[in-house]
Amino acid sequence: MSQSLILSHPTGHLHGSIKLPASKSEANRALIIAALSGKQAELHNLSEANDTQLLQRLLQSDAATIDAEDAGTVMRFLTAYYAITGQEKLLTGTERMCQRPIKVLVDALRELGASISYKGQEGYPPLQIGAFKGSGKKHLKVRSDISSQYISALLMIAPLLPEGLELELEGKIGSRPYIEMTLSLMQHFGVTAAFEGNTITVKPQQYKSAAFTVESDWSAASYWYSLVALAKEADITLLGLKENSFQGDRAIVEIMSGLGVYTEFVDGGVRLQKKEHEHHISQDFSDCPDLAQTVVALSAALGVQVDMTGLESLRIKETDRIQALQIEVQSMRASLQEVTPGVFRLEPGLMKHTDLSFRTYQDHRMAMAFAPVALLQPVKIQEPSVVRKSYPRFWEDLEEVGFEIKYKD
C-alpha cells in the first residue's frame, strides 16, 4: 500500500511569501531550443520539476533507449528533436504514456522526412526514430484541437528544416498561449516567425546563443489562489511572477477574481488577498486547461456553480482528468456532468463534515487541486509524492504557512 498524508490547518489563517517553482513549460522549451542551437546557452532558474530535470538528463544521454517516463512535453518535444537531428533512438515511457496518442505529431514529422516507426500499438509510443532524410515539403496541415505540444514541437525544429515550415492549423486552436510562448522563446533565441490567421510561417534560419531566465510557474500559483480563497484570512505573496507573462495560466488572475481572490502585482511578484466570491461563473479553458482541476475542486468547496468549456484535452493527460474529477467531487457532495456536448457543469452540494480522502490517479494536479480543501476540514491525499512532477516542494511550502501534515502508510 502506498503512502498517503493527512493535511489540516489549525487556524485557517495564511500569511507569508512563497518562492514558486519555475515554469516547466518555459524551461522545457528553452532546453530544446538551446540543444537545437548547438551553442552554449545561459539558462537561469531552470525548473526543479521532475519533467524538466528529466529532459535535461535525456538531452545529454547517449543511450539508445530513452525513457520519457510520464512527461508529455518530454515525449513530444524529444520525438521532434531526435527526428530532425537524425538520432537513432527508441523513445518510450510509462504504461500511461504509451496510452497517450502521438499519431498527429508522428504523421507530420514523417511528411517532413523523418523516419519513425511504432514498436507497439499504431499511433502510440514507444517509437523507433532513425535518420532524417528530408522530403522537401514545407506546407503542413495539423489538427490544432488536441495538444498544442505537437505544434510547439514542430515549430521549434522548423528553422532547421531545409525549406522551413508553413504550418496550417486546422480547427479550433487549443492552448493558443502555449503556441505563442513557443514563438516568443524562439524569437528570444534569434528566430523570427509569422503567425497570421491559422498559419504559422518559419523560414530556414539559425538559432542564436542567448541568456534566458525562466519565470515562476503560473500553474503552481493557481493552487495558492485556491488556498487564499478557502482561508479564513489570507495575505500571501507569490514571488517570481510577471504581469506580462508568456504563460497561458496567467488567466488564473481573472478567473479567481470571481472566486474570491484579489490580485495585486507588486515588485517581484503578486500579492493575494481574500474578497467576496460569486455564486456562478462560466469559463472557457481552451487556453488554460491545466487550471480546470483547481477551479473544479475550489468551486465544489466554495459552493459555486461553474459552466465550463474547452476541456477536450483533459481526456489525454496524465489520467482522464474529467473522469477523475467526476469521481472525486462526489465525496464533497458535488457533481460534474456534461450538460450539452462540450459543456460541463459543476453543481456544488452541501459539504458534510465526514472523512475526506482524495485519490490522485498518478496525476500531480489532482493532489494539488484538492489539497486546499484541508482549510475547511482535514483531508487525506493518497500518493502525495506525485507532486514531484511539477512542484516538488509543494507540501513543504504548505507547512511554511501553518499546515500540519501527518504521513501514513
Image (spheres, rainbow, N blue to C red):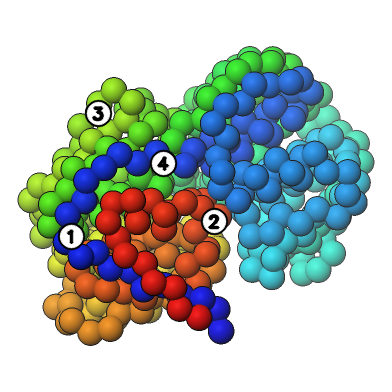
Mark whose residue sits in front, 3 or 2: 2
The answer to whether residue 281 shows anywhere in this view is no
- The answer to whether the residues at label 1 and label 2 have Cβ atoms under 8 Å apart is no
Under mark 2, the amino acid is Arg
Q: Earlier in the sequence, mark 1 or mark 2?
A: 1
How far across and down, in percent of the image, does residue 360 sit?
Answer: 46, 71
How many callouts does the rendering have? 4
Quarter containing the N terminus: bottom right
Q: At numbered mark 3, what does the secondary structure look like: helix, strand or loop?
A: strand
User: Residue beneath label 3, please?
Assistant: 265
In which image quadrant can residue 268 be found?
top left
How far across and down, in percent of the image, does residue 162 sit?
Answer: 81, 24
Is 314 placed left or right of 346 in the picture?
Answer: right
- The answer to whether the residues at label 3 and label 2 have Cβ atoms under 8 Å apart is no
Mark 4 neighbour density, 10 Å: few (under 14) some (14–19) many (20 or more): many
User: Residue beneath label 1, please?
Assistant: 12
In which image quadrant can residue 190 be found?
top right
The label shown at residue 20 is 4
User: Residue beneath label 2, please?
Assistant: 388
Q: Residue at x 36, y 79 (%)?
A: 357
In the depicted structure, whether residue 180 falls above or below residue 83: above
Q: Residue at x 20, y 32 (%)?
A: 264
Q: Earlier in the sequence, mark 3 or mark 4?
A: 4
* Foreground residue among 337 and 76: 76
Q: Gap in Å between the C-alphas at discs 3 and 2?
A: 28 Å
In the depicted structure, whether residue 402 falls above or below residue 200: below
Q: Gap in Å between the C-alphas at discs 3 and 1?
A: 24 Å
Under mark 3, the amino acid is Phe
Q: At numbered mark 1, what does the secondary structure look like: helix, strand or loop?
A: loop
Is 375 placed left or right of 366 in the picture?
Answer: left
